[in-house]
Image: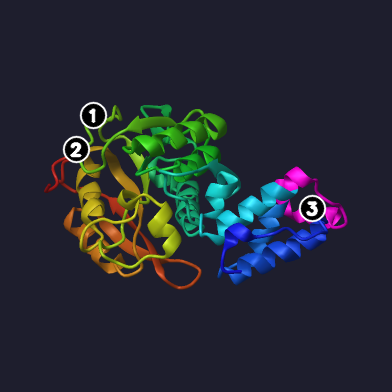
């Protein structure tokens, strides 16, 4: 099967046959999970949930559905991301619209989202916090949550859905990514405030009250420039959402230095990183005045994201070295 464009459908267009055909085609093209991806493609053509395919195994699709599937399989064999073909990417318990010009969310980032949710739910009463907010002057203030380098918005959306009374900001500078971010926010969590902002510049123009943010999540570009990445990342993800200087920490370093302008005392920050830069990122956080910096690992045992607290002890927000 040297030329995917010459791919021909089997004579039998039953779901059972198409699942086997799709899996064989994707396997021959070197796709890592051919059976799982064939199930997703066939389910989208029917359409149904992948778990419902067994109910349709003896059903045949029509010619239009068959040609749609053939086209999708050809595109996937050519290494177009599955998420671009289907137009969406799953994350936690929802899916977001994605396409050319926005970084495709990875399953590993769900670990950062879950850490943030668990952290907010376990905030100690001694800090004057509850799951829904903070006691200030006898009144309950909603939690303030910030997603920097929001991309399609998955982290902001996961937190907004978990804490619907929280004030959540999603900051992104790419005009193309902002289009997807707006669409996903409108569909999934309209209360999220989308901010067009450059994470490399000071944060006093974002319209977020100084010293108010309780938790920050961030999945910045973090791959060292010049590193070899897989074909789909190289061809489909925006380079400025992947690479960040020789050590991969150029933007992360700036974010850590600019954030204190927005952070409340005791705020927590969670930032994803490359699997070889966790220790260096923790050192950068310590140098910027953060405390309790620690690394967290993914299910494969690789360092995945760093967390830290902002307890200034004399540091004035916005006055860290820049």
| Region in magenta | 43-65
User: Residue placed at 35% from the left, 37% from the top?
Assistant: 171
Q: Considering the image in quadrants, where does the N terminus appear?
A: bottom right
Residue 302 lies in quadrant: bottom left
- Above or below, comparing residue 58 to residue 123 in the picture: below
Front one among 24 and 51: 24
Residue 174 lies in quadrant: top left
162 left or right, relative to 250: right
Q: Contact (CB < 8 A) between labels 3 and 1? A: no
Tag 1: Cα neighbours inside 10 Å, few (<14), some, or many (≥20)? few
Tag 3: Cα neighbours inside 10 Å, few (<14), some, or many (≥20)? few
The answer to whether residue 135 shows anywhere in this view is yes
Position in image of residue 309 (x %, y %)? 30, 52
The stretch drawn in magenta includes residue 27: no
111 left or right, relative to 314: right
Q: What is the CA distance from the residue labelled 3 to the residue labelled 1?
A: 49 Å
Q: Which residue is the site of mark 2?
A: 202
Position in image of residue 6 (x %, y %)? 62, 60
User: Residue placed at 77% from the left, 46% from the top?
Assistant: 63
Q: Which residue is the site of mark 1?
A: 205
Q: Which residue is the site of mark 3?
A: 52
User: Residue placed at 48% from the left, 56% from the top?
Assistant: 106
Q: Contact (CB < 8 A) between labels 2 and 3? A: no
């Amino acid at each position: 099967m040297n030329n995917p464009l010459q791919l021909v459908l089997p004579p039998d267009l039953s779901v059972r046959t198409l699942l086997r055909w799709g899996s064989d085609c994707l396997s021959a093209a070197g796709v890592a999970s051919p059976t799982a991806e064939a199930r997703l493609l066939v389910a989208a053509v029917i359409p149904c949930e992948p778990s419902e395919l067994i109910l349709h195994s003896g059903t045949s699709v029509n010619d239009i559905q068959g040609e749609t599937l053939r086209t999708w399989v050809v595109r996937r064999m050519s290494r177009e991301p599955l998420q671009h073909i289907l137009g969406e990417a799953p994350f936690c318990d929802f899916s977001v619209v994605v396409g050319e010009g926005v970084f495709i969310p990875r399953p590993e980032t769900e670990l950062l989202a879950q850490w943030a949710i668990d952290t907010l739910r376990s905030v100690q009463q001694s800090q004057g916090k509850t799951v829904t907010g903070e006691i200030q002057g006898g009144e309950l203030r909603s939690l303030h949550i910030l997603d920097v380098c929001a991309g399609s918005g998955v982290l902001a959306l996961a937190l907004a859905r978990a804490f619907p009374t929280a004030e959540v900001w999603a900051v992104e500078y790419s005009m193309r990514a902002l289009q997807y971010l707006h669409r996903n926010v409108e569909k999934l969590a309209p209360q999220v405030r989308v901010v067009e902002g450059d994470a490399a510049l000071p944060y006093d123009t974002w319209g977020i009250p100084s010293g108010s943010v309780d938790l920050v999540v961030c999945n910045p570009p973090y791959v060292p420039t010049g590193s070899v990445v897989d074909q789909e990342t190289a061809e489909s993800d925006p380079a400025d959402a992947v690479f960040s200087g020789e050590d991969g920490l150029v933007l992360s370093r700036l974010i850590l230095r600019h954030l204190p302008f927005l952070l409340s005392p005791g705020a927590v920050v969670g930032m994803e990183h490359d699997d070889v830069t966790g220790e260096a990122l923790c050192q950068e956080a310590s140098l910027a005045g953060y405390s309790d910096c620690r690394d967290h690992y993914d299910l494969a045992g690789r360092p995945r994201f760093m967390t830290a607290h902002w307890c200034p002890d004399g540091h004035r927000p916005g006055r860290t070295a820049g």
